[in-house]
Image (cartoon, helix red, strand yellow):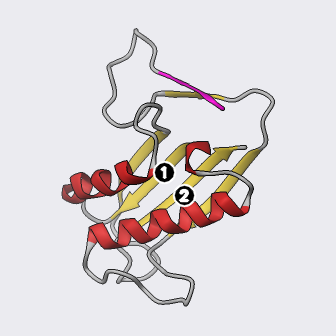
């Protein structure tokens, strides 16, 4: 498992780690996931919590297919349309990740994603 840590010389993060250190493991990159289910349908039109939940279900399916689980995620990049929804996004995220050792994360508000009905996209890196 990656060593996730927060140097004492940096501020204490809330819900993520500053550093992920990997040695001797297989690194898996997971493409940006959106709220499209396995049938190709959008889940949660205009609903950040529902879309985020589907995104995490897709991430879970991807990391499982690579032979891992959600605890193997070491980096998450969030792209979303409205930063005011960050508390909803974090609430759903907390259902899926190990909050005792949360992945390194970046959150970016963007003007638009590839479709107008997509509110959030998350890509990930796992070590397995």
- Residue 122 in the image: state x and y as whole percent: 48, 60
Looking at the image, which is closer to me, 128 or 33? 128
Element on which disc 1 rests:
strand
Which residue is rendered at x = 41% and y = 59% of the image? 79
Residue 61 on the magenta segment: no
Q: Would you call the spot at circle 2 few (<14 residues within 10 Å), some (14-19), or many (20 or more)?
A: some
Residue at 56 percent across and 43 percent down: it is 71
Give the distance between the C-alpha atoms of the residues marked 1 and 2, in whole angstroms. Answer: 5 Å
Measuring from the top left, give residue 51's x and y in whole percent.
36, 72
**Quarter occupied by the N terminus:** top right
Q: Is residue 2 magenta?
A: yes
The C terminus sits in image quarter: top right
On screen, residue 88 above or below 118: above
Tell me: residue 43, above or below residue 91.
Answer: below
In percent of width and height, residue 47 lies at 25, 75
Do callouts 1 and 2 mark residues in contact (Cβ within 8 Å)?
yes
Q: Which residue is mark 2?
A: 123
> Magenta stretch mostly in which secondary structure?
strand
Extreme-top residue of the structure: 9
- Which contiguous range is marked in magenta? 1-5
Looking at the image, is 90 positioned above or below residue 1?
Answer: below
Q: Which residue is mark 1?
A: 77
Quarter of image, res 62: bottom right
């Amino acid at each position: 498992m990656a060593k996730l840590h927060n140097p004492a010389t940096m501020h204490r993060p809330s819900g993520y780690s500053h550093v992920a250190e990997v040695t001797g493991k297989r690194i898996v990159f997971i493409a940006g996931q959106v709220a499209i289910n396995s049938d190709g349908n959008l889940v949660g039109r205009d609903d950040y919590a529902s879309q985020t939940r589907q995104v995490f279900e897709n991430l879970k399916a991807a990391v499982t297919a690579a032979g891992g689980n959600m605890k193997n995620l070491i980096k998450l990049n969030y792209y979303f349309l409205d930063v005011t929804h960050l508390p909803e996004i974090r609430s759903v995220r907390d259902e899926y990740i190990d909050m005792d050792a949360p992945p390194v994360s970046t959150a970016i508000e963007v003007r638009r994603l590839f479709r107008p009905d997509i509110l959030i996209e998350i890509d990930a890196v796992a070590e397995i």
